[in-house]
Image (spheres, grey):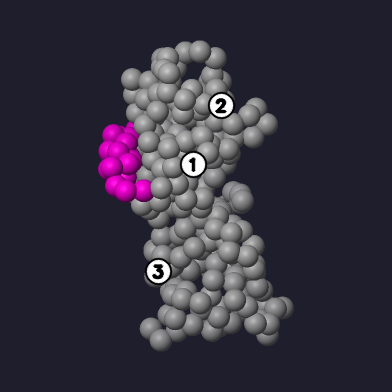
Amino acid sequence: MESYKNPISLFKQTNFSKTIWWKLKVNISGYQNETENKLVTEIFKNRIFRLIYPNIHQNNHKFSRILVQLYEDGYICWINLDGLIIEKYDLNKTESLKNENLLIKDKINSILKWIKDQAELSNEYLWGGSLGPNFDCSGLIQTAFLKHQIHIPRDSYQIKSFCKHLFYFKESYTALRPGDLLFFGTLEKCDHIGIYKGDGLYYHSSGKDFGRNGIGLDTLKQSNDKISLHYKSKLISAGRVVRNYRWDRTIR
C-alpha cells in the first residue's frame, strides 16, 4: 500500500474524520504537547488510534505533529508525522466479555512472571516509558496487562480510578492477593503504582530520587530498607483490575 507511509494523504482522503480508526505499523512516541519533546508515553506497533486534531478546517496547514486518542486506554497525546506508518482499521463494536473478571484473574500469574522477567533485564526508570526495557511506574503496569490482552488506563491516578477499590491502607495488607495494584501518593493525588506479588512483596518501577532507578521488588513488611520505608509511608489504597477499559471514556 503506497499510502501506508503518507498519513496526511490518508487523513485528507477521509476529510480528517474523527470516527475512523487507524492501526500503527511501527512503535512511536507520544508527547505532552505540539512542540516540546516531553515524552508522556510510548506506543506499540499495532495499537489503534483516531485523529483528534487537525480537522477538515486546518487541512491546508503544515503539521509536524497530530493529536490522537488511543483505542486501548482512551489516552490522548501528540505524535510525530515523521516516520509514522499507518493503515485504516475497521473497529468492530466491542462487546463486553462474559466472565471478564475470571479471565483477568487467570492471567495474573503470567502477568507477574512477565514483570519478573523485565526486572531481570538491564533497565532504568524512564518517564513516559512503556515499551521497555525502561519503564515508568504506570507504563510497566499497563504494558504488563496489555501484553496479556487486558486494557487498562495509562497513568497511575487513572488506573486508581478505574480499578475496583479494595481498601485504604491502615496497617494490614493481609486482604491483598497477587496481582492487586498498590497506589501511592497523597489523598489528593496518586502519583505512583505497584503490583502485589504476594508475601508482603510488590514490584514497581521507581525513580532515582527515592527509588531504585528501575524495576525492583519492595516490601510492605517491617523493614530497615529506606526505599521500602519511603514507599510504605506513601501508600494510599489498593485496587483490583476486574474489567477491560472501554475507549469511549476519554481520559488524559
Q: In this view, does 74 lie to the left or right of 88?
A: right
Q: Nearer the viewer, mark 2 or mark 3?
A: 2
Determine which quarter of the picture holds residue 158. Answer: top right
To which residue does mark 2 refer?
Answer: 234
SS of the residue under disc 1 = loop
Question: Residue 57 placed where, x, y %?
Answer: 72, 78
Q: Which numbered disc, 2 or 3, marks the residue that appears first in the sequence?
A: 3
The magenta region covers 105-123
The numbered mark at residue 208 is: 1
To which residue does mark 3 refer?
Answer: 26
The amino acid type found where label 1 is placed reads: Lys
Q: Count of labels shown?
A: 3
Magenta-highlighted stretch: main secondary structure? Answer: helix
SS of the residue under disc 3 = loop
Instruction: Tell me what residue is drawn at x 43 percent, y 37 percent.
Output: 212
The amino acid type found where label 3 is placed reads: Val
Q: Nearer the viewer, residue 249 or 184?
A: 184
